[in-house]
Amino acid sequence: MNIKVLGIDLAKYSFSIHGVNEHDKPVFRKTVKRHKLLETLSHISPCTIGIEACSGAHHWARKMSSLGHTVKIMAPKFVVPYRHNEKNDANDARAICEAVTRPNTRFVSHKNQEQQAVLCIHRIRQGLIKDRTARLNRIRGLLEEFGFATPKGRYPGQKVIQTILEDAENDLPNLARELIDETWQSVLELNKDILHYDRKLYRLANQSNQAKRIMTIPGIGELSATAIVASVNDAKQFDNARQFSAWLGLVPKQYTTGGHIRLGRITKRGDKYLRTLLIHGARSVIAACKHKTDKTSLWIKDLIERRGFGRACVALASKNARLVWALLTSKQEYRINF
């Protein structure tokens, strides 16, 4: 069989494969188990393989590439228009096989194991932060039941909670004090765990030349730098800086018809975690630019006055994303524009 393109619908145990020849005629249809997938592909001459971006996609892309195949990973949204009739594994594989050959389909660059390991730290840290927030909110709600109000914010809230639990003369019942204190101790343990992963990321950032280069941009710290380097294998896959910013969902939605351009809110597409880090970094820059007179600070202050604080944060985050792309592709150092 002269197979030109394969579409593989990835799953946990059962994989559907659809192959076509150079005339786009179906010549291979098969469903194989997990332990038989690589053996089946090893008997096929090197060809183009399309798979959807999902859990395990980068692992399988590395394995298939080692067999000589050209593997392309795409977002599921690019596959949906080519799926006909009902949704099942065979139809999904056929749709993937067709979508991978389309010129307008955008593909995801392969991540190596080191990049995925760094992202593991970010995901674990992010989960711990969510757990801490949930437990702090639980403590706030329980204390409110007994008439104790806690201020907004993590640091002020933790300080007041500690004071309430240590005050033995307030009206908090002993049983409630004991139960809330147990939850409070788990919050303190989460603080230690989060700090542990923060220090890991700081060390990794200082060991990476790419991370150190983009950390010179105001608003890009160790967290943002390591997350970007781990998520973007090759910045040159984006044609320009705006395309990179659009990949992060930091460009406005557009509805243009009849020559009338209408721009709305940002698209919020792509990686939510990276977008959040960039916007939080922009907030820190804006908070510190009140008394600065460089061009960027003057532009930010003028933008806040015209468009408001929130839009200024997003605009600066988008600007930083474009600077990140420029530094990653040119391998130059960031120069402050005075």
Image (cartoon, rainbow, N blue to C red):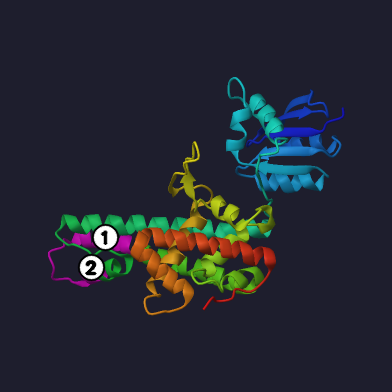
The range drawn in magenta is 162-184
| Cα distance in 3D space between marks 1 and 2 | 8 Å
Task: Look at 32% across and 65% down and name the residue there.
Answer: 154
What is the number of the mark on residue 22?
Answer: none
Name the N-terminal-most of marks 1 and 2: 2
Reply yes or no: does residue 173 show up in magenta: yes
Q: Secondary structure at mark 1?
A: helix
Residue 312 x/y as whole percent: 41, 62
- Asked if 230 appears above or below 334 in the picture, the reply is above
Secondary structure mainly formed by the magenta segment: helix
Q: Is residue 304 above or below residue 40?
A: below
Locate residue 250 relative to residue 154 in the image: left or right. right
- Residue bearing mark 1: 180
Q: Residue at x 22, y 64 (%)?
A: 150
Residue 226 visible in the displayed image: no
Q: Nearer the viewer, residue 138 or 63?
A: 63
Instruction: Label 2, secondary structure: give it.
Output: helix
Proximity of marks 1 and 2: CB atoms separated by less than 8 Å: yes
* Badge 2: residue crowd in 10 Å (few <14, some 14–19, many ≥20): some
| Apparent side of residue 152 relative to residue 284 in the rendered image (left or right) | left
Along the line of sight, the residue nearer the viewer: 31 or 13: 31
At 68% from the left and 69% from the top, the residue drawn is: 331
Residue that label 2 marks: 165
Reply yes or no: does residue 97 show up in magenta.
no
Report the side of 112 relative to 318 (left or right): right
Q: Position of residue 268 (x, y in %)?
A: 47, 48
Please state, as top left, top right, bottom left or bottom right, where the N terminus lies in the image.
Answer: top right
What kind of residue is marked 1? Ile
